[in-house]
Image (tube, rainbow, N blue to C red):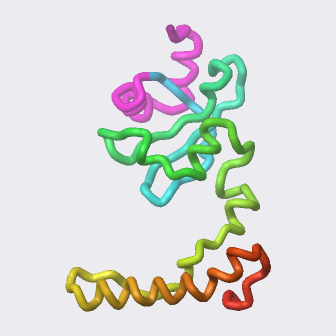
Amino acid sequence: MVSIIRYVRNIRRTGIAAWWRNMQYIGDAKAGTYVGKDQFGNRYYENLNPEDEIPGRHRWVDFAQHYSNATQVPAEWHSWLSHIRQSPPPEDNVIQNLSPVWQGVSLRYTSDHQSCSAFLLALDREFDRHEGCLQTLQHCPAQN
């Protein structure tokens, strides 16, 4: 149950329109600091005030789509929401320095079969360039 003081305080912080949206989407009057946004348009918030939030419920996501589920949260944001990582992905150096093997492949997939097979062939060649580096866990000269 939400305390009346917390409820009124959060309405004053967010405004009537944001309060109404929060009640419709997440069912609670929450107010917090905007932390970041992912590639799907989901917005992430945090409230570190112990008087406002129950411990463990001070981080939350505001989904871009009304009908949402947990599969719409990317892995890096999920690790932040579930307290596996302390800092959010925009501030986390480990996540910022990750570069997938397929990064740098500048091909676009189209619906015709010839382009699809060309895309998969180029992706396979790009993976083969990096495969030796992945097996030995050394710096990859192919990325230079």
**Residue at the spot 39% in from the left edge and 47% down from the top edge:** 64
**Residue at the spot 57% in from the left edge and 44% down from the top edge:** 78
Residue 108: quadrant of the picture: bottom left
Is 140 displayed left or right of 18 in the figure?
right
| Count of residue discs | 0
Q: Position of residue 12 (x, y in %)?
A: 54, 25
14 inside magenta stretch: yes
Q: Which residues are magenta?
A: 1-27
Q: Position of residue 7 (x, y in %)?
A: 52, 16
Q: Position of residue 132 (x, y in %)?
A: 68, 82
Secondary structure mainly formed by the magenta segment? helix
**Residue 57 higher or lower than 115, as above or below:** above
Is 59 displayed left or right of 22 in the figure?
right
Is 42 displayed left or right of 49 in the figure?
left
103 inside magenta stretch: no
Is 49 displayed left or right of 37 in the figure?
right
**Residue 90 higher or lower than 121, as above or below:** above
Q: Which quadrant of the rendered structure holds the C terminus?
A: bottom right
Q: Determine if residue 75 is in view.
A: yes
**Residue 78 higher or lower than 118, as above or below:** above
**Residue at the spot 51% in from the left edge and 52% down from the top edge:** 74
Q: Position of residue 11 (x, y in %)?
A: 50, 24
**Residue 39 higher or lower than 130, as above or below:** above
**Residue at the spot 67% in from the left edge and 67% down from the top edge:** 98
Q: Front-most of 59 and 138?
A: 138
- Looking at the image, which residue sits at the far right? 138
